Image: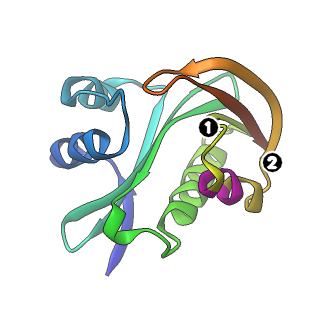
Amino acid sequence: MMEYVLMTQEHIGQIAALEQENFSMPWSENAISAELKNPLSLWIVAVDRQKVVGYVGSQSVLGEADMMNLAVDAMYRRQGIGKQLVLSLIDGLAHNAVSKLTLEVRASNTAAISLYESLGFLQVGRRPNYYSGPKEDALILRKEWDV
């Protein structure tokens, strides 16, 4: 049974492994672990029978959040886990009086862009050559809600 829970220290190693599998510049275990001590951070983890199958992380300042990381294990994609992670994040942010969420996504990542647009995110900008490995522009997407 899938559970969506706040990140704890026991999740760090599995999250770091998913970072390695999914990103050209993955976060280290130390960087992820530091988020647990950061009062501005909110990380949600999707867990299936004690296995971390996805996660999303954000940092908030003055009612606005930046989504920094979102990944789902390749074997668990196309099951709505990414969508539920983002919805859980928005719910958690709203409970903390945050009403705006911004993220960057590779311009070529049509699956992610489609997911975000289905959740009401709108493109508000573009960052040229934001990503490396390979070099690519980032689209800046944003969603706002009432709290």
Residue at image point 81% right, 38% down: 123
Q: Is residue 14 above or below residue 140?
A: below
Residue at image point 30% right, 65% down: 47
- Residue 111: x and y in percent read 61, 57
- Residue 116: x and y in percent read 69, 53
Q: Is residue 62 above or below residue 22?
A: above
- Residue 72: x and y in percent read 40, 57
**Magenta region: which residues?**
111-115
Q: Are marks 1 and 2 in contact (CB under 8 Å)?
A: no
Quadrant for residue 133, please give it. Answer: top left
Query: Mark 2 is on which residue type?
Result: Trp
Q: Main secondary structure of the magenta part?
A: helix
Residue at image point 23% right, 27% down: 28
Q: Earlier in the sequence, mark 1 or mark 2?
A: 1
On residue 105, the disc is: 1
Q: Which of pointers 1 and 2 indicates the residue nearer the eye? A: 1
- Which image quarter holds the N terminus? bottom left
Q: How many marks?
A: 2
Does residue 37 appear left or right of residue 102 in this picture? left
Does residue 116 appear left or right of residue 77 in this picture? right
- Residue 34: x and y in percent read 28, 24
Disc 2 residue crowd, few under 14, some 14–19, many 20+, Cα 10 Å: few
Residue at image point 29% right, 31% down: 32
Query: Mark 1 is on which residue type?
Result: Val
Q: Which residue is mark 2?
A: 145
Does residue 25 appear left or right of residue 70 in this picture? left
Who is closer to the viewer here, 91 or 119?
A: 119
Furthest residue in direction bottom, as rendered: 1
Q: Is residue 127 above or below residue 53?
A: above
Who is closer to the viewer here, 57 or 60?
A: 57
Residue 86 within the magenta-colored segment of the rendering: no
Q: Secondary structure at mark 2?
A: loop
